[in-house]
Image: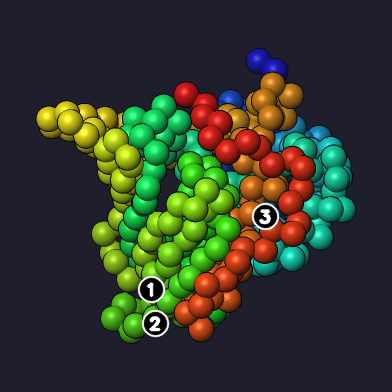
Amino acid sequence: MTEVRVGVSGLGSIGRQHLTALRAAGATTLYGFDAASATCEAALVAHPDLRLVDSFDALLDSRLDAVVVAVPDHAHLAQLEAAAKAGIAVLVEKPLAPSAAEAATVIDRLGPAGNHCLVGYVLRHNAACLRVAGLLADRAIGEPTSFQVLLGAYGTITVAANRFATPAYGRLYGDYSHEWDYLSWWFGAITAVTAVERTVDVVPHVETPNLVDALLETESGLIGALHIDYVDRRGLRQVSVIGTDGSLTADLGGGTTEVRRTGVDGAQRFADLAPAGVALTRQAAHLLAVARGDEEPRVTLADGLAALQVADALRTSAPTRSWVTVDRHHHPGNRHQHGDVDR
């Protein structure tokens, strides 16, 4: 078997999930780095054959085929830039950076070296998400006229407690930039937003804010509503789309999609059920394919920047509850065409 060497920087809960996914995707030798010795020890318990190194530079010196950057958000860009300039295929966790301006500066510096980098919007590999993308591309419900998103994710805080230990305003906007990414993938670029936010203390760990409601407008004029929170403990991630010829409802977490077509009795139901971690394994396999040169990044650095631009616009809007135009003056040329579906 040909050796496939992959490194993971940041061995917290998401880093350890990446190690599992990379092994399942075909990585034969795994290297890891984390500045916290206790975190390294926890990673070794789960992955006894993990080869630990004592610095990020040492990780890059390990003749890697690919590297995953899963450190805290503020450190993403420095490690991404170093790995990309070393010629290593990189998967950087979302959000790409704390702000769009910081990300844009690094993307400009990288130039063509950024073409083998991808951002960890794992829902691009989620079966139900792909199902919806395919149905929309096939115009199964005609032209979309509106959408609604409902996301309740308090459970994330309990799974990744260390990441939430330090207070930070507006973390919700970046943590769930997944939504800005897949909505742009399905419907085209988000061009304007208006948002309201609230902080409630009905849960043990309180983020500021922990409830956000927003309206989003796309480049085609489509307007949709979104609710995200760090309060609901059910772990909901649901999307509804109304079109000119019907409607669809998808449970992206549960894997079920229901389509109702105008003039057709009953509903067509799809069950894209998969064990936990499958989407992450698919993403890991995609990273290895990018490293081999067999595939182009499905989620480019420009996509990661676009999601941050939406997050920044929402943060700007919420205090005044005003409509804010999404700042897209920086629009790198490696952005993929919206609507491309890998089925």
Q: Amino acid at mark 3?
A: Leu
The residue wearing badge 1 is: 211
Residue at the image position 23 percent from the left and 33 percent from the top? 261
Q: Secondary structure at mark 2?
A: loop
Distance between the alpha carbons at the discs numbered 3 and 2: 27 Å
Q: Indicate the position of residue 300 as horizontal and vertical percent values.
A: 67, 42
Instruction: Name the mark nearer the viewer: 3 or 2.
Output: 3
Circles 1 and 3: CB atoms closer than 8 Å: no
Disc number at residue 150?
A: none
Q: Is residue 227 left or right of residue 97?
A: left
Badge 3 crowding class, 10 Å Cα cut-off, few under 14, some 14 to 19, many 20 or more, is: many
Q: Is residue 16 above or below residue 257?
A: below
Q: Secondary structure at mark 3?
A: helix
**Figure quadrant of the N terminus:** top right
Q: Is residue 103 above or below residue 132?
A: below
Front residue of this view, candidates 277 and 52: 277
Front residue of this view, candidates 92 and 7: 92
Circles 2 and 1: CB atoms closer than 8 Å: yes
Residue at the image position 77 percent from the left and 38 percent from the top? 115
Q: Earlier in the sequence, mark 1 or mark 3?
A: 1
Q: Earlier in the sequence, mark 2 or mark 1?
A: 2
Circles 3 and 2: CB atoms closer than 8 Å: no
- Asked which quadrant contains residue 35, the reply is bottom right
The residue wearing badge 2 is: 199
Disc number at residue 305?
A: 3
Badge 1 crowding class, 10 Å Cα cut-off, few under 14, some 14 to 19, many 20 or more, is: some
Q: Indicate the position of residue 29 as horizontal and vertical percent values.
A: 66, 32
Residue at the image position 69 percent from the left and 21 percent from the top? 294
In this rendering, does residue 306 appear at all? yes
